[in-house]
């Protein structure tokens, strides 16, 4: 009988969607650290692959729970030209079935947001997500702005697009969207705190109380919350 470690070694040498699926199903990682070690090995194996092939690989993994979707997103995001090869159609496939906070944020921060930033997805398309009845699509659109502004995600600051998204969704009271807007505005503070403060002032009558509180704290103290404890 093949031991899990042997199976994982074989996966690196003969990498296919099916061999990755087998590992994730029959000998799944026990924690994030163990999963990330696997993913890094798989990333090394696909580094020389054409980006389109890596995207196709990802499309075959997203339905393998709980690790498949995260594996797919990071394999593409960590490939040298993975994000550059994304299209509206491939993003649609990679985003199918999104229905939880963590998956949405990973999709938006690793793939959809960077693709928007690099011109692979249009602003019109992101705005269409804002109008969707599905809360997760609306959250995706708002979290996409994080990739415009957070240095760790490759952002270099984009006041106009970030505030335009927030303006269009300012009256939404879905908790997932409200939390996303708070994150979007707090991410922009480092680039233009005056613009963020002016946004809060202009939309004081409609912006959610949570957004006012958390963003005001960020402007005043550099933290999301006034206390030293993280939320």
Image (spheres, rainbow, N blue to C red):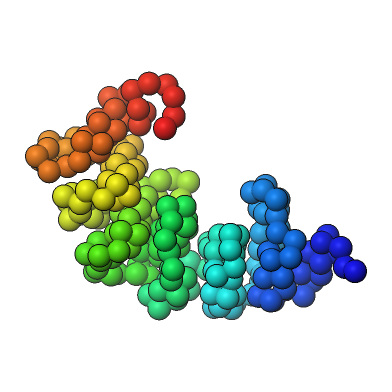
The answer to whether residue 191 of the structure is visible from this angle is: no
Q: Position of residue 163 (x, y in %)?
A: 21, 49
- In the rendered image, which quarter contains the C terminus? top left
The residue at 35%/59% (across/down) is: 136
Give the camera-side residue of 27 and 120: 27
Q: Camera-side residue: 155 or 75?
A: 75
Residue closest to the eye, 200 or 35: 35
Q: Position of residue 5 (x, y in %)?
A: 83, 60
Image position, residue 1 (x, y; %): 90, 69
On screen, residue 3 versus residue 133, left or right, reads right
Where, by quadrant of the figure, is residue 214 drawn?
top left
Q: Residue at x 55, y 70 (%)?
A: 63
State whether residue 186 appears in this view.
yes
Query: Relative to residue 209, is residue 189 drawn left or right?
Result: right
| Residue 179, x across and y down, in percent | 32, 44
Q: Is residue 189 left or right of 54 when viewed as pictured? A: left
Q: Residue at x 12, y 37 (%)?
A: 204
Residue sitting at x 43%, y 45%:
151
């Amino acid at each position: 009988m093949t031991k899990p470690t042997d199976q994982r070694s074989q996966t690196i040498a003969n990498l296919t969607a099916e061999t990755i699926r087998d590992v994730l199903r029959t000998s799944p990682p026990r924690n994030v650290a163990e999963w990330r070690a696997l993913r890094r090995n798989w990333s090394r194996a696909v580094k020389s692959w054409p980006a389109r092939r890596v995207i196709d690989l990802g499309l075959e993994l997203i339905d393998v729970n709980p690790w498949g979707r995260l594996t797919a997103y990071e394999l593409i995001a960590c490939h040298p030209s993975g994000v550059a090869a994304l299209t509206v159609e491939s993003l649609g496939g990679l985003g199918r079935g999104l229905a939880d906070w963590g998956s949405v944020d990973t999709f938006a921060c690793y793939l959809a947001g960077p693709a928007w930033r690099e011109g692979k997805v249009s602003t019109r398309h992101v705005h269409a997500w804002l109008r969707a009845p599905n809360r997760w699509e609306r959250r995706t659109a708002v979290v996409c702005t994080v990739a415009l502004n957070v240095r760790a995600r490759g952002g270099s600051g984009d006041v106009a697009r970030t505030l335009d998204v927030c303006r269009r969704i300012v009256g939404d009271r879905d908790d997932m969207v409200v939390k996303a807007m708070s994150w979007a505005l707090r991410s922009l503070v480092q680039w233009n705190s005056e613009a963020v403060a002016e946004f809060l002032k202009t939309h004081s009558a409609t912006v959610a109380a949570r957004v006012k509180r958390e963003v005001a704290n960020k402007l005043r103290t550099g933290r999301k919350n006034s206390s030293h404890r993280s939320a």
